[in-house]
Image: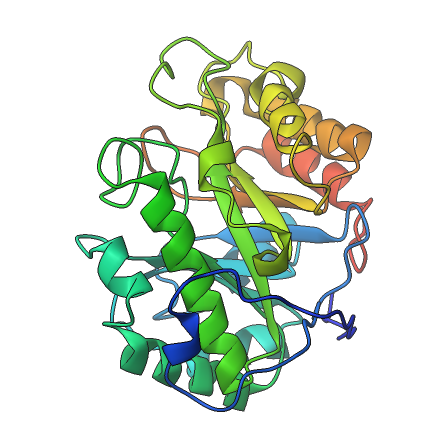
Amino acid sequence: MAATAISVRAGIEDQAAGDQQSAGAQPSTEVYQALPSKPESYLGLYAPQMPGSYSSVTSFTQMTGVAPDVVMYYSSWLEHFRTDFAQTAARHGAVPLIQMEPAGISLAAIAAGAYDSYLASYAQSVRAYGDAVILSFGHEMNGSWYSWGYRHASAADFVKAWRHVVMVFRKVGADNVTWLWTANIVSAQPGNSEIPSPGAWWPGGSYVTWVGIDGYYIQPSWRFVSLFGPTIAIIRKFTGEPILISETGAAQAGQTTQIADLAAGVHTYGLLGFVWFDAKGKLDWSIRSPAAIAALRDAASAYPGQSA
């Protein structure tokens, strides 16, 4: 689906101390929602080699018959915006989703403006690109496996850093950004006991466009309602922003059934869609079997620009 820009304007209030000192152009007084927020609009993909190459995306489409309209990659701190990748994605009717990872970086330093020159440069590149971009900063912060997350950095510092990053982009005028605040599923399944509610990391609706939730079908018996349902319920207590399943996959053993379950869950809960992690991680999440491909095609038939 080619992204159709929609401008939704609303006043903003700078709640973060020190944000008035951010580098860049004069502050914007408007918030832009650059992408539609209709349920079942986005079928996204992460695949190896991105953003260095788009070949894994085209190979996925050739194999499955499904053309992603969101393509995700992970960006290390101080890495610049990949305009070349974004332009390629746009030519294929997709929107880039970038997960900015401040690994080993002090959140307090980010909030204090220590990296404003980098952030302003990044924002200027995004603004110059001009088309829609989805940005997330410090994803899965309620998990304990990243330096910016639970038990490693304070939630208060995360909130200040998130707000500061958003304000730098706004002051530069990068209004083509959809801000995706991405949490991990809470302790809904055995083995996830160290994942608390993400509420403490919420920066406020003035700084977020969409909410992302990451979670995987690790066991063949797991289903959407128990995997994602509790986290959705918690998030709905503090925001009504549209929700995207921003990173997910299913192990080979239950993949066919769970792809159908994922699609049904997105529909039932009225979510934006999902981003499939088509690679090997903790397990092999890649879709390769004829039955899984057929299940994905069937799921995709509900999405704009796709057909079963």
What's the residue at 46%, 35% (across, down)? 200
Using residue 227 as the reference point, say whether residue 9 is left or right of it: right
Q: Nearer the viewer, residue 176 or 204?
A: 204
The answer to which image quadrant residue 75 occupies is bottom left
Q: Nearer the viewer, residue 125 or 90?
A: 125
What's the residue at 40%, 40% (across, down)? 140
The answer to which image quadrant residue 289 occupies is top right
What's the residue at 52%, 13% (across, down)? 220
**Residue 83 image position (x, y, % from top left):** 44, 82
Looking at the image, which residue sits at the far left? 104
Using residue 131 as the reference point, say whether residue 285 is left or right of it: left
Using residue 215 as the reference point, say whether residue 156 is left or right of it: left
Q: Nearer the viewer, residue 107 or 275?
A: 107
Identify the coloring: rainbow
**Residue 266 image position (x, y, % from top left):** 73, 34
**Residue 79 image position (x, y, % from top left):** 28, 72
Viewer can see residue 287:
no
What's the residue at 58%, 26% (across, down)? 231
The answer to whether 167 is drawn above or below residue 57 in the figure is below
Which quadrant: the C terminus? top right
**Residue 85 image position (x, y, % from top left):** 45, 76
Looking at the image, which residue sits at the far front? 17
Viewer can see residue 128:
yes
